[in-house]
Structure formats: C-alpha cells, structure tokens
Image (cartoon, grey):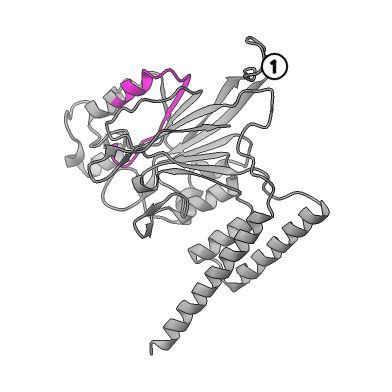
C-alpha cells in the first residue's frame, strides 16, 4: 500500500529537479540584471529599508525615502507606538513611510475590539490620539512621491535637469494567520484580489511594502516557508522594482529576481499549482528565450529585476539587534 505514495513522491522530486535545471539554464541566458537607475546623469533614489525594530532605534543611514515595514513595537502599546513615531519623525529623510506589523496592535482597532485584553499599557488613548509627525502611514493604501532630479556625483553642484522622478508606494500590514495577532488573514486568492494592490497595474518605479513576505523569497524559517503564495501571485503580476517586507527575522537579506514567465512557471510548480504540463511550457519558454537571444530577435518579457528586501533588523528569541539596515538605490 505504500508503493504508490513512494512513486508519487519520486515523480514530484523528479519534476522539481527538472524545473530547477530549466530555471538555472534560463538564468544563464538572461542579459545582465538591471537593478538601478538607467539614467547616467541622474543620482539614484536612495531608499533606506528597515523592519521589525521591536522598540529598538537603530542608527539609520541617510537617504531620500525611509521605509519601515512593520513591527515598530514589541507589544503595541500607545507609548511604544508614539515613541517609535517620534524616532522615525526625527530622521532626516524627506519621506518616511510606515506600515504596521502583527505586533503593532494599537493600529488594528478591529483586532482590539475582538481581543480587548491585548490593549497593553495605557488604555484611554487610541490610534486617533497618536502624533504622526512627518510619518506617512499606509494601510492597504498607496501614495506617489515626487523627487527632484539631482545631478550625478560627477557633475557640478547645482546642476538640475528640470525633470522630476516619481515613485508609487503601496503598503499593507497583513500577514497570514499564525496566532491571534494584529492584521492577519487566512491565505486565499480573494484576500489580495479584494485589496488595493489588485487595482494597480505594472509600472516603472513601483514599490510594494508588506509586513509579510511572498512565498519562496526571503521567507524561510527553519524548514518552513512562511510566505504567502497569493501575495507572490500579485507581485509576479506587477513586477515592482522593489518589494520590502520583514516578519521572518531569520530571512533578513536582499535578492534580485527577474519575474518573467519562466520564473512564474517555476514558482507555480513549486507551490503545487503546476504539473507536468507547466513544466513542458516552461521548457518551451526557456528554449524560445534562448533562441531570441541568439538571433537578436525581440526582447525578454521582463527586462528589469525586482529587488526583494527582508529588512528585519532583529534576531533570536530576545529580538536583539543583529541585522544591518539595507539601502537600495533605484
């Protein structure tokens, strides 16, 4: 009775091995990744990425945009949240963006109505009483930031091209449900389909900020992948220039990935949404992309990489500062 199960596991393992070999072959045939500003006479936009500070206040490098991807606090009390906002507001970055995390319970009023015992510290002041200072808070919402174009370092000071650069930033605090905590959801396609993220179209200089990671990308905790496959679906559709998140402290880091149709097929197979037919289609795509590159016909369906950043700065059971703040230049 066990033999069929063994055969199924063997076939699945073989399929995953073939899928990985195809992806590696495809990566070898890709042009050099583009991860930064392609205008040589413009200084790049410096984005400082931080997450999961849990009441710590690390030294932050300078930049144009400061992004905090949630878990500003440890218990989410009013005093903790206000102290975190004061710290962020004191920073020199012209634009400061914050989303909540599952620890920031003060900001999830629906959760506190359901679990009033989780309102720690002072109970008379609420989210409405916070002084946000110069911090912009995003909760399934978006904003457009306009930045003046500065001269590149090799050009004289004061030189201006008269062109402004714009970035669109979407932020969401939600993570897949684990234990009762703020801003959690049961993973399903409907959750992200009903979010403001689904209303966006692929565009240059799109930045997505979520507290939790997408499936497979800087989401490993021990032997478990904690990311959301349905969030990955939206990220693959949008192909943002930058996706910043945290939540999984042990997976801190950066990875640059071209989210083309080959990568989409690869991820679908890993999730379990794609079978041998998807593998065959992936092989066709790999061959076609290689042929186009050899004969110089057409372009890849994704010419820029998406930069994934897990910006968690704490680690270990005591949530001590262990990880560096990550700076990205677009």
> For residue 95: magenta?
yes
Which residue is at the front of the view, 7 or 79? Answer: 7
Looking at the image, residue 59 sits to the left or right of residue 307; the answer is left
| Residue located farthest toward the front when viewing the structure as drawn | 154
Which residue is at the front of the view, 251 or 306? Answer: 251
Looking at the image, residue 213 sits to the left or right of residue 182; the answer is right
Q: Residue at x 77, y 53 (%)?
A: 293
Residue 253 % position (x, y):
44, 43
- Quadrant where the C terminus lies? top right
Looking at the rendering, which quadrant does residue 135 occupy? top left
Looking at the image, residue 172 sits to the left or right of residue 166; the answer is left
Total number of numbered discs in the rendering: 1
> For residue 16: magenta?
no
Q: Which residue is mark 1?
A: 161
Residue 162 % position (x, y):
69, 15
Q: Residue at x 60, y 56 (%)?
A: 263
| Residue located farthest toward the bottom when viewing the structure as drawn | 1
| Residue located farthest toward the top when viewing the structure as drawn | 158
- Secondary structure type for disc 1: loop
Looking at the image, residue 135 sits to the left or right of residue 301; the answer is left
- Quadrant where the N terminus lies? bottom left
The stretch of residues the image draws in magenta is 84-104
């Amino acid at each position: 009775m066990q033999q069929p199960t063994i055969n199924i596991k063997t076939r699945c393992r073989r399929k995953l091995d073939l899928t990985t070999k195809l992806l590696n072959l495809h990566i070898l045939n890709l042009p050099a990744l583009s991860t930064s500003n392609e205008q040589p006479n413009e200084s790049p936009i410096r984005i400082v990425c931080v997450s999961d500070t849990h009441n710590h206040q690390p030294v932050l490098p300078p930049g144009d945009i400061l992004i905090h991807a949630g878990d500003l606090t440890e218990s989410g009390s009013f005093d903790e949240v206000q102290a975190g906002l004061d710290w962020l507001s004191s920073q020199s970055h012209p634009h400061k963006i914050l989303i909540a995390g599952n620890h920031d319970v003060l900001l999830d009023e629906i959760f506190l109505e359901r679990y009033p015992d989780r309102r720690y510290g002072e109970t008379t002041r609420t989210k409405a009483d916070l002084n946000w200072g110069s911090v912009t808070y995003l909760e399934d919402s978006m904003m457009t930031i306009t930045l003046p174009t500065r001269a590149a370092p090799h050009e004289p000071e004061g030189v201006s091209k008269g062109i402004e650069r714009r970035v669109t930033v979407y932020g969401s605090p939600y993570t897949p449900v684990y234990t009762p905590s703020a801003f959690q959801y049961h993973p399903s396609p409907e959750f992200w389909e009903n979010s403001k993220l689904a209303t966006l179209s692929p565009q240059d200089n799109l930045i997505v900020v979520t507290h939790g990671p997408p499936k497979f990308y800087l989401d490993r905790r021990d032997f478990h992948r904690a990311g959301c496959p349905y969030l990955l679906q939206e990220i693959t559709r949008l192909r943002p220039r930058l996706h910043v998140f945290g939540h999984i402290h042990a997976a801190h880091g950066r990875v640059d990935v071209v989210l083309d149709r080959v990568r989409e097929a690869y991820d679908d197979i890993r999730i379990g949404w794609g079978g041998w037919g998807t593998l065959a289609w992936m092989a066709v795509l790999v061959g076609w992309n290689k042929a186009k590159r050899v004969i110089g016909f057409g372009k890849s369906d994704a010419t820029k990489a998406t930069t994934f950043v897990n910006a968690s700065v704490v680690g270990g059971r005591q949530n001590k500062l262990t990880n560096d703040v990550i700076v990205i230049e677009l």
